[in-house]
Amino acid sequence: MQIPPETPLALPPPNRLIQTMCCFSGKVTFVQNTRIFARMGQAGRQGLVYQMNVGAPADLAMILPLPVAADSKEDALKFIDLSGYPKFFSHLRAAFPVPRSDDGSDSDPFGAQPLAAQLKVHEVGSYEASFVPKLADFARLDARFRLPDDVWKNLPQFADYGFAVFKLKQGDREIHPMAFTFPTRHPAKLFFPTVHIHDGQVHAEEEFDHDLYCQVRKTGRFAMTRWEESSGPAQRTCNIERSRGFLAQGQHLHRLSLTGKHKNEDILLETA
């Protein structure tokens, strides 16, 4: 298997502010080149891998709201360390020969986990991470990982969501892939967290700079008409073993590039 080299990190000019995605507990100077991979596992567990370029003048937390299944417990989300596969997304991109014009050992990360008694902070590669099963549980998390309560009052659509929380260190860089699986309330759909949140508000439209990737069991459906399909299975350009269960052997990859103005909402892709 021939694995392509990593794409060099290109940071934006200092005077250019890239619109931010998701929620941050502090100031960011830019967020760009967001990449998200999704695949549905067994027993209603979805896997997500997330990577971006970010600039932060100080340590802060990134918070991803997730449509977890009802009554999900505190250890329902399983964090997976992909620091050993920093080229995960460049290998996904290599599966699509036409470039964009604007140019470990867990064998089954989707497996069910035993219940935990308290919220925990996990060491996941270069991150500290936690799962907050519901909004009220933010009070039980370290204060450095929280947003003000008034922010969530302005976002009623996330009232019954769970939240993956990652602490990011200061500096301008490409972070290594953040990966986890969670019990989803949408077992027939793949969820992509693409809502942009600014100052506790969600605007109708936002600027996007995203590449979305997925593997699905059924192809050729209407839902996939906007998605580009790779010319071969994932193992042609990707290291299946180093993906720690996120990539399925023998399945093709699909990609959707979103740039410019788009409706500001999360994406749910029909998979059944």
Image (cartoon, rainbow, N blue to C red):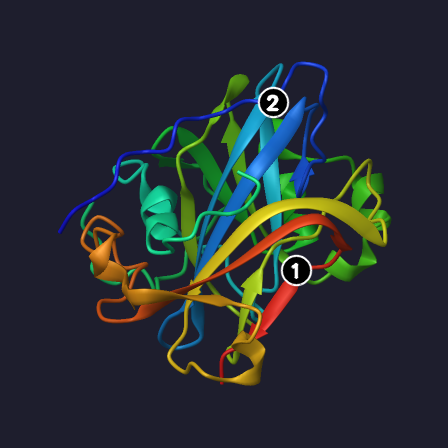
Among the 4 quarters of the image, the one containing residue 23: top right
Q: What's the residue at 72%, 15% (across, down)?
A: 15
Q: How many marks?
A: 2
Nearer to the camera, 190 or 236: 236
Residue type for callout 2 = Pro
Residue 62 point in image, percent of width and height: 59, 36
* Residue 22 in the image: above or below residue 110: above
Q: Is residue 5 visible?
A: yes
- Give neighbour class at mark 2: few <14, some 14-19, many 20+ (Cα, 10 Å): some
Among the 4 quarters of the image, the one containing residue 43: bottom left
Among the 4 quarters of the image, the one containing residue 18: top right
> Under tag 1, what secondary structure?
loop
Q: CA distance from mark 2 to mark 1?
A: 33 Å
Residue type for callout 1 = Tyr
Nearer to the camera, 249 or 114: 249
Which of discs 2 and 1 lies nearer the camera? The answer is 2
Residue 199 point in image, percent of width and height: 82, 35
Q: Is residue 112 visible?
A: no
Q: Which mark is residue 97?
A: none
> Under tag 2, what secondary structure?
loop
Residue 110 point in image, percent of width and height: 34, 65
* Residue 132 in the image: above or below residue 147: below
Nearer to the camera, 153 or 235: 235
Q: Answer with mark 2 or mark 1, whichever residue precedes in sequence.
A: 2
Nearer to the camera, 237 or 271: 237
Q: Which residue is mark 1?
A: 161
Q: What's the residue at 22%, 67% (across, down)?
A: 249
Residue 70 point in image, percent of width and height: 60, 71
- Give neighbour class at mark 1: few <14, some 14-19, many 20+ (Cα, 10 Å): many
Q: Which residue is mark 2?
A: 12
The single residue placed furthest to the left in the displayed view is 1
